[in-house]
């Protein structure tokens, strides 16, 4: 338990953190021979592979992360990817497919496969909102990848279907912070894509909504560093959009807010 929580809570970046990740990863590697020959330990084995993948991904070792995620899916496939899988097993498989897609050598193919599986999952478990959450999170991750690759139209196409679906959940759970975070990210990449495509007003509206949501999230947890970083980035992104279309006073105001919040 202690090893798992340590590995899950460490953020990459510093030399000390990277070293700690390596130590924890080594301990995980030592556990694999103890459980891989025992079918009853399939769940433990799968969890170890996922954690090793997470740690490698945080350190930017994408090939190693992909290998671990594929090992997870191989160990888990009879449960996660069966035609009539159990919701919990399906959801775990979907989550790891999303993670694999983000580090795969051919990310477009991997994300396309993950989204196709996610759609089947939502159809298979229509009352399971976590299936919808994973599908929307995968769409957002795919849009981020496409945007960074300069494929702006495809990024918008990937992410926009998620927006009304997340809105419907938030209509029922307006105080849900994790779904609000999902919507903020969906608007972020949709808006950024529209700006690049020349759809200024549509892009601006989406970025404004993303900023509003990130502000709400940051106010809910003032000491959360990740949320403050998201708010800073939202201010800068919208400020740049205002600047580029000549709304200089509004751009300056957002830049000043970003400096204060950073």
Image: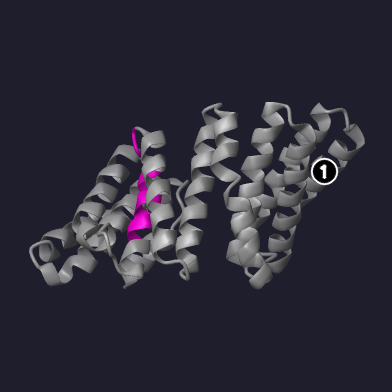
Nearer to us in this view, 160 or 138: 160
* Rendered view: 126 above or below 225: below
Report the residue at 51% width, 47% height from top. 139
The secondary element bearing badge 1 is classed as helix
Q: Which residue is mark 1?
A: 254
- Quadrant housing residue 247: top right
Confirm whether the magenta stretch covers residue 93.
yes
The image position of residue 215, as x and y in percent, is 74, 57
Locate residue 204: give its quadrant. top right
Horizontal side of 58 relative to 154 (left or right) equals left
Image location of residue 144, percent across then percent down: 54, 40
Residue 148 falls in which quadrant of the image?
Answer: top right
Depth order, front residue of 222/191: 191
Q: Tally the marks.
A: 1
Name the residue: 36% across, 40% down. 110
Q: Nearer the viewer, residue 135 or 257?
A: 135
Residue 256 vs residue 129, the one in the foreground: 129
| Residue 22 is covered by the magenta coloring | no
Left/right placement of residue 101 relative to residue 208 reads: left
Magenta region's main secondary structure? helix
Colouring scheme applied when the structure was drawn? one colour
Asked if residue 5 is positioned above or below residue 121 in the image, the reply reads below
Which segment did they paint magenta?
92-105
Q: In the orientation shown, which residue stands out farthest toward the left? A: 37
Q: Can residue 145 be seen by looking at this rendering?
A: yes
Please determine whether, in this image, residue 199 is positioned above or below residue 70: above
Picture residue at 11% right of the left edge, 65% below the top? 34
Residue 18 appears in the rendering: no
Q: Quadrant of the N terminus?
A: bottom left
Q: Can you say whether 9 is above or below 236 in the image?
A: below
Q: Position of residue 102 (x, y in %)?
A: 41, 42
Q: Where in the figure is residue 43, as x and y percent of width and height?
A: 23, 67
């Amino acid at each position: 338990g202690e090893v798992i929580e340590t590995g899950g809570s460490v953020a990459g970046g510093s030399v000390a953190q990277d070293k700690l990740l390596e130590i924890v990863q080594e301990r995980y590697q030592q556990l694999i021979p103890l459980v891989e020959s025992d079918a009853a330990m399939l769940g433990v084995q799968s969890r170890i592979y996922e954690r090793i993948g997470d740690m490698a991904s945080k350190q930017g070792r994408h090939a190693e992360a992909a290998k671990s995620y594929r090992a997870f899916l191989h160990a888990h496939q009879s449960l996660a990817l069966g035609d009539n899988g159990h919701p919990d097993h399906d959801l775990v498989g979907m989550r790891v497919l999303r993670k694999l897609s983000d580090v795969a050598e051919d990310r477009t193919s991997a994300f396309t496969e993950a989204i196709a599986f996610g759609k089947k999952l939502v159809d298979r478990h229509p009352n399971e909102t976590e299936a919808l959450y994973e599908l929307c999170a995968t769409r957002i991750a795919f849009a981020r990848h496409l945007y960074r690759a300069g494929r702006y139209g495809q990024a918008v196409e990937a992410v926009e279907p998620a927006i009304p679906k997340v809105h419907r959940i938030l209509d029922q759970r307006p105080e849900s912070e994790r779904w609000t975070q999902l919507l903020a990210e969906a608007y972020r990449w949709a808006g950024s894509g529209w700006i690049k495509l020349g759809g200024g007003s549509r892009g601006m509206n989406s970025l404004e909504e993303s900023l509003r949501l990130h502000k709400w999230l940051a106010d809910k947890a003032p000491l959360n560093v990740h949320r403050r970083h998201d708010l800073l980035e939202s201010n800068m992104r919208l400020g740049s959009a205002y600047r580029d279309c000549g709304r200089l006073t509004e751009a300056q105001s957002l830049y000043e807010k970003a400096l204060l919040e950073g």
